[in-house]
Amino acid sequence: MLVEKHPLKPQSLLSLKLKPYWSGNYSLYKMLNPQEILKKNSFRVTQHRCEVLTYFIQSKIALNHRQLELKYRGTINRVSLYRILHSFTEKKILCKLIDSVGSVSYVLDKHSSQNDSHVHPHYKCKTCHDVVELPELPADYRRELEKLNVLQLNMLAEGICQECQKSMK
Amino acid sequence: MLVEKHPLKPQSLLSLKLKPYWSGNYSLYKMLNPQEILKKNSFRVTQHRCEVLTYFIQSKIALNHRQLELKYRGTINRVSLYRILHSFTEKKILCKLIDSVGSVSYVLDKHSSQNDSHVHPHYKCKTCHDVVELPELPADYRRELEKLNVLQLNMLAEGICQECQKSMK
DNA sequence: GAGTATAATGCAACAATGTTGCAAAATTAA
DNA sequence: TTAATTTTGCAACATTGTTGCATTATACTC
């Protein structure tokens, strides 16, 4: 059910000037191992946090609580998972994605180590759960939002990515 | 707790070229009474549906299930409310808004009677629950989204509107 | 390395939100 | 008025997320 894909389809992304999720600054995560990431965020280095973080780094796709609950059934408690996801999101290690039905999933936050207050809209494939980052909203538009004193912006586009469309034929 | 405001603050909106929620085509709802709207959407004209629809038309703000449950406690059953909200959303009488925490609220859909497949991002005040429509995403940006075969787009900005900011001082 | 302060975990219970099946009631069309 | 169909209420259930508290693990100091 949960398909891990490596690497992300480059052709469709390049044509749209999107930023594939596993490239550029994101490769910071390749250099820092989970332990270092945890320490950097003043977490204690525990087995559970390490495992969850490692899983996010390896899988690169959006994962929801239920998927993790299944994966770690008998190992990590439901409540602990909620707390791990919550604290990772708070420290911007993870980015919380909310789709048009209200379902929540999490993906590694590309911008965690940057001082970056911009909005980063995401695109999530409904089939493979792959996430790519959409281009930033145009500056004019962002300026309008700023005038409105926007505190939160929830923006997630969903569809079926080209790769999944191909494999459906 | 639930504050109904009439009319919407025009000054802040005009400067940003936003579309106040209760103007323009939206006033279609002034001409059609709830009964007609229901018939037009092939619903049966029942007391419950009429009341809920009337309430949305009068209040103009975003309402969530809990608020309606409180308002109609002892009158309309919890489950019926869910079903009414669901069916209204399906027929695009209401528009379902999902904020950055995943909370769901509903607002009258301005575009229900138009053949309009554009994305209509909204801004919701966290204090008074007023909703205004944000300008459409720029055409260039929309074109990129179309290439990605976007099926759903969830986009809701939240903040504290100028009027509420004033009254907080 | 032992002891201590603090953080993380597991468990149970709870809370909020949403769904399903089915019988009863209301609405519509004839 | 009758019959077909939709809507409603109720009970029960499902999912998702939260809280308090005792226990365990981690990090820090000596």
Image (cartoon, coloured by chain):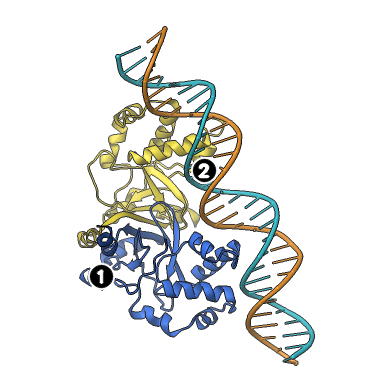
Chain colours: A blue, B yellow, C cyan, D orange
Under tag 1, what secondary structure? Answer: helix
Does residue B115 lie above or below A141 as drawn?
above
Q: Could you say which disc has been placed on residue A35 in the image?
A: none
User: Within 10 Å of the Cα at label 2, are there few (<14), some (14-19), or many (20+) other Cα atoms?
Assistant: some
Mark pair 2, 1: CA separation = 42 Å
User: x, y percentage for residue A49?
Assistant: 55, 74
- Res B99 visible: yes
Between D23 and B61, which is closer to the camera in this rendering? D23
User: Within 10 Å of the Cα at label 1, are there few (<14), some (14-19), or many (20+) other Cα atoms?
Assistant: some
Does residue A23 lie above or below B152 as drawn?
below
What residue did someone put label 1 on?
Answer: A13
Total marks in image: 2
User: x, y percentage for residue B33?
Assistant: 33, 28
Q: Which callout, 2 or 1, points to the residue nearer the camera?
A: 1
Q: Chain of mark 2?
A: B
Give, as a three-letter code, the residue at label 1: Leu
What residue did someone put label 2 on?
Answer: B66
Whether label 2 touches label 1, CB < 8 Å: no
